[in-house]
Amino acid sequence: MEDCVGVGEMENWRRRKKRNNKSSSSSLTSRNYYNYGCPISNLDDGCLMHIFSFLPPIPDRYNTALVCHRWQYLACHPRLWLRVDRSVKEFSEPGVFPSIETAVSAARPGDTILIAAGGSHLASNIQINKPLCLIGGGELPDETTLLCSRGSDSALEFMSTCKLSNLTVKAELGCCLLHRSGRLTIDGCVLQCESNPLDYLSCPIISTASGCKILASSLKTDCDGVSVIQTRIEGGAKAVLTNGDLSLQRVRVIYTRTSVYFWFDIAHQ
């Protein structure tokens, strides 16, 4: 009888030990999960920043900054994009500039410049001769405005492959965007030329590019052009003026109650 009792107590002790091991293992796993988060967070800052560099700036890279404080620091690091904020003092913060012109001058080829929403940023005859991406920081393009002063030929002049997104560009005379070479993409923007008796002198987009060039190092061709995607174009004598070998192609228009949105390409015939 005593032997049976001893065997029963031993079995009960083994069952309790097994249950305790399971519960401690599950609590350890849970604790590790909450302490370290998802496995990608175990990577060091350099690896994470390299991964973030492959994300489209808007909306993916912008959304990563909302995950946690560490991801916000890495996603907004000057190595990934520069920022333009009129409220900052000149060069008081690394990677933050008081004007678009200074940000463009400091940018390296391939950089992304995030322009702060609110108010108007002066942009007059700014030449961009390296691949850059300029993005408005607001939820809508109307929240980030580039204003071209009267008497300037253009707000921005492009001589390399660039992209504009979520921006409003206003010009009283001259043109909003002057395209001389490279591939220019205008995505989700607003281009406005002021309506006045001299509006025949203004044009939202002017392209003087010559078309395709055969590269000496290979049989490939380097073609200039402009792609406009879901963009509002207002005012001016014409939406587009081409002085080179490019022509307007694949035009689509959507009318809404308040606006007209354009999709088209300016490409070699």
Image (cartoon, helix red, strand yellow):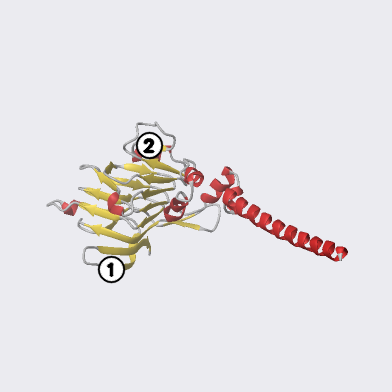
Query: Residue 145 got which mark?
Result: none
Q: Is residue 253 above or below residue 164?
A: below
Mark 2 surroundings: few (<14), some (14-19) or many (≥20) residues within 10 A: many
Whole-percent x and y of residue 209?
36, 53
Is residue 10 visible to us here? yes
**Residue that protrudes farthest toward the left in the picture:** 197
Q: Nearer the viewer, residue 1 or 66?
A: 1
Whole-percent x and y of residue 41?
57, 49
Q: Nearer the viewer, residue 230 or 209?
A: 230
Pointer 1: what residue?
254
Of the residues shown, which amino acid type is indicated by label 1?
A: Ile
Whole-percent x and y of residue 211?
40, 57
Q: Is residue 251 above or below residue 111?
A: below
Q: Is residue 107 above or below residue 19?
A: above
Of the residues shown, which amino acid type is indicated by label 2?
A: Phe
Q: Nearer the viewer, residue 113 or 161?
A: 113
